[in-house]
Amino acid sequence: MLLEALTLQLGYNATLVAIGAMLLGIAAGVTGTFLFLRKRALVSDAISHATLPGVGLAFIVMVWFGMDGRSLIGLLIGSALSAWVGLLCVQWLSNRTRLSEDSAIGAVLSVFFGAGVVLLTVIQGMSAGRQAGLDSLLLGSTAGMLLSDAILIAVGGALVLALTLLLRRPMSLVAFDSDYAAASGLSVARIDLATMGLVLAVTVVGLKIVGLILIVALLIIPPVTARFWTERTERVWLIAGALGGLSGYVGAAISASAPALPTGPIIVLVAFALFVLSLLFSPARGVLSSVLTHLQYRRRVHRRQGLLALAQGQPIYEGYTLRLLQREGLARADGVATEEGQARAAKALLDEKRWEILRGLQAHEATAARYDGLTNLETILTKDQLRDLDTRIAAPREVTP
């Protein structure tokens, strides 16, 4: 059944939900990248929790006017207004008081979420409005999702993605150097507000699928995962979008194949699984790569020290060094160099002499600063420069009668 879900063969609604979740994941990954690079990831937490009072108030207002209180578009409008008020509160507290931004976020997050829980409790006591299932917006659920809801989410995700791509250049500039952006004529405050507006839109659109609590994870985990794979901004948001889209698509497919599983947590768990894989296996920053690099560096250091000891006729006391030289055929078990070991040891001693002379030459000061005892000089200097160094090593001695 999972294969059918992954190949979009579980019906029209399931297909729309999977595509909508994928678009939402792409939009969240791309938008969250600029939030992450601006080092304001916690703002998304305040925005998401601030949506809850809006959901409750929108439900009450719609019931008051005799409408269906669970209309998704009405709930999304209410949550957007509430989140916008929460965002303005964070901005005001940060800019007009002595509170730091994280303190303002903590205050707004807790107050708005508490108010939302109170409103949901009040709604549970109401006799009208079909309030059952309203709390599914906390963790997300696609069970009972209407076709119009799926289309609304898919279109909303696509619009947010298009706006984010349109604003990516000024948002990148502000994220990396806000002073330079301001000097270039950009309004940093307006671009920050636009970024927060896009985050707010992603949060509101993702309420039904991921839920207001877990949408933060979909905004932050893909960019953090993408940083394991590249150092360049234009690639970070591309990779983050791809990872977010993959998480949304696979998570929605798994949830559709097992309806008892909540959609939001499954999508977040898929995103987390991608994060763990990246943490372990990314070539530049992964744990496995770091361990292999450390082991390789340790092996090079011990090989170099062992060869220098052989060249100077000194005994090797370090067990690992001796085993390494034996394994590579450079020394015998008694610590005596083999024929190949003698050649390698002579070369290591020659390089050491070359580095020693190079460090005393002012013309090669920059090159000498790269000395680590492991780098081959042939990769840094030209043949003529090496020949000059060798000449200095073999300088003619004074002949005395």
Image: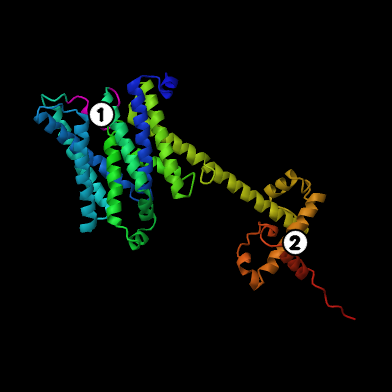
The residue under the point 35% across, 31% down is: 21
Task: Tell me the residue that label 2 is attached to.
Answer: 350
Residue at 29% x, 32% y is 153
Q: From this view, report whether residue 398 is shown above or below residue 107.
A: below
Q: Main secondary structure of the magenta part?
A: loop
Residue 197: which numbered mark, if any? Answer: none
Image spot of residue 257 (x, y percent): 38, 21
Q: Residues within 10 Å of mark 1 (few under 14, many from 20)?
A: some
Q: Was residue 135 drawn as part of the magenta stretch in this picture? A: yes
Q: What element does badge 1 sit on? A: helix
Return the x and y of residue 63 as percentages of the image width and height: 12, 29
Residue 267 visible: yes
Quadrant for residue 9, please give it: top left
Give the residue type that dot 1 points to.
Ser
Q: Quadrant of the N terminus?
A: top left
Label pair 1/2, CB-CB below 8 angstroms:
no
Where does residue 313 sit, x and y in percent of width and height?
A: 78, 58
- The magenta segment: 131-143
Quarter holding the C terminus?
A: bottom right
* Kind of residue at disc 2: Leu
Question: Is 31 or 301 nearer to us in this picture?
Answer: 31
